[in-house]
Amino acid sequence: MKIANKDGLYSSKIESLERKFGKKDLLPLWVADMDFEVTHEISEALINRAKRPIYPYTIYPDEYFKAIINWLGSRFDFKVEKDDIIPSFGVVNSINLAIKAFSNVGDKIIVQTPIYPPFIKSVKRNKREILDNKLIYKSGKYSIDFDDFRAKAKEAKIFLLCSPHNPTTRVWSKEELQEMVDICKKEGVIIVSDEIHSDITFKPHTPLPKIDGAKDITIYLHSPSKSFNVAGLNDSYTIIFNDSLKRAYKLELASCGLEDGNIFSIEALITAYSKCGYWVDEVKEYLLENKSFVREFLEINIPQIKAVDSEATFLLWLDCKGLNLTQKELEELFVNKAKLALNSGTDFGKNGDGFMRINIATSKEILQEALNRLLKAIKD
């Protein structure tokens, strides 16, 4: 994979270092986008569109919907029709829209920590109450506390599911998904399923609407942004099969004025899904090598840190408890001693204490440099 130079591109990973970590001279391995250049097909499609000197208000063409239908059908055997697809501005944006559409101020929403920070922020900013179904970490793997989930579902209006899970990288089994669906259906809980990482998995992933009984209660969210490294184009889509839920979601979308398309994100999605599936497969192979490299380095040189078994995504969840440091001391080690910008575990909730998240979608040379810095910092 070819590494891109992000300097001068308004990249959050680079430009936000000082705001987030208090300094600029860090190796950035935090924001969840890749360092890889996008495919030449996507670049050419965007360049060719930019060369046409007119940028009007834009509809979503039939090719857009066909590309999504074909992608989901070929990758997941997930059958969708055009009327089920609602183009959206971004997955986080869609989570907020769903919260507004399907709950009221003060209602309770289930999340499973440690969890992608915007899940927690979206609940709090919309003045809803969090019900934390903490994931269980045992013998190096995460699982769901179903007794707790069952109890919390009795109080909840919405369940925000992350599938595959970020940051733990769990790919939920069909049995786990089925149990969550059965509980939510019994208690009248709507499931908002963020499946943005589902194209990059290392074991079979099942879209939630394929689970028995799930279609009628699921708001499915997906995007090409993680899979094809086009997050800056702000394109995603929502799939809803239940007509009543679909109407409510569309009404909320319209109230925010987010119905129009973006010329460039439309071009990128059509091109990515129609021509670039090979690239995702190549990225997965590269990431497998990077995962093995990081895991072996830690096992040999820093056995106090263990990489949680990665089932999906280009992220690794690092169990640093063997260092016997507080989270503040852990952050001090990584940021000020090793000069590395990683995500602190507690950014994902209190259940992330003792962990750090690293983005491995970069070159092996950069990962080697990062790990050597960490080793030196620990030795010093």
Image (spheres, grey):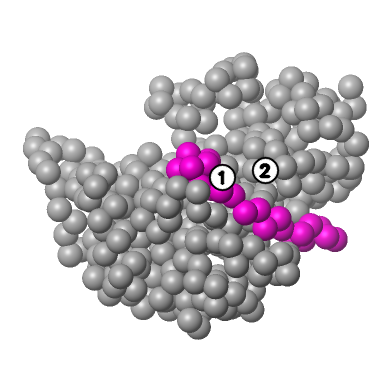
Q: Which residues are magenta?
A: 118-142
Q: Position of residue 169 (x, y in %)?
A: 64, 56
Mark 2, other Cα within 10 Å: few <14 / some 14–19 / many ≥20? some
Determine the secondary structure under disc 1.
helix
2 or 1: tag closer to the N-terminus = 1
User: Which residue lies at the image location 52% right of the left edge and 31% below the top edge?
Assistant: 13
Q: Which mark is residue 39?
A: none
Q: Quadrant for residue 321, please give it.
A: top right
**Left or right, residue 322 beside residue 107:** right
Relative to 287, is 23 above or below? above
Magenta-colored stretch includes residue 121: yes
Q: Quadrant of the C terminus?
A: top right
- Name the residue type under label 2: Gly
Q: CA distance from mark 2 to mark 1?
A: 8 Å
* Viewer-nearest residue: 280 or 314: 314
Q: Which residue is mark 2?
A: 349
Determine the secondary structure under disc 2.
loop
Magenta-colored stretch includes residue 96: no
Q: Position of residue 16 (x, y in %)?
A: 51, 24
Q: Which mark is residue 120?
A: 1
Q: Position of residue 245 (x, y in %)?
A: 34, 67
* Viewer-nearest residue: 133 or 338: 133
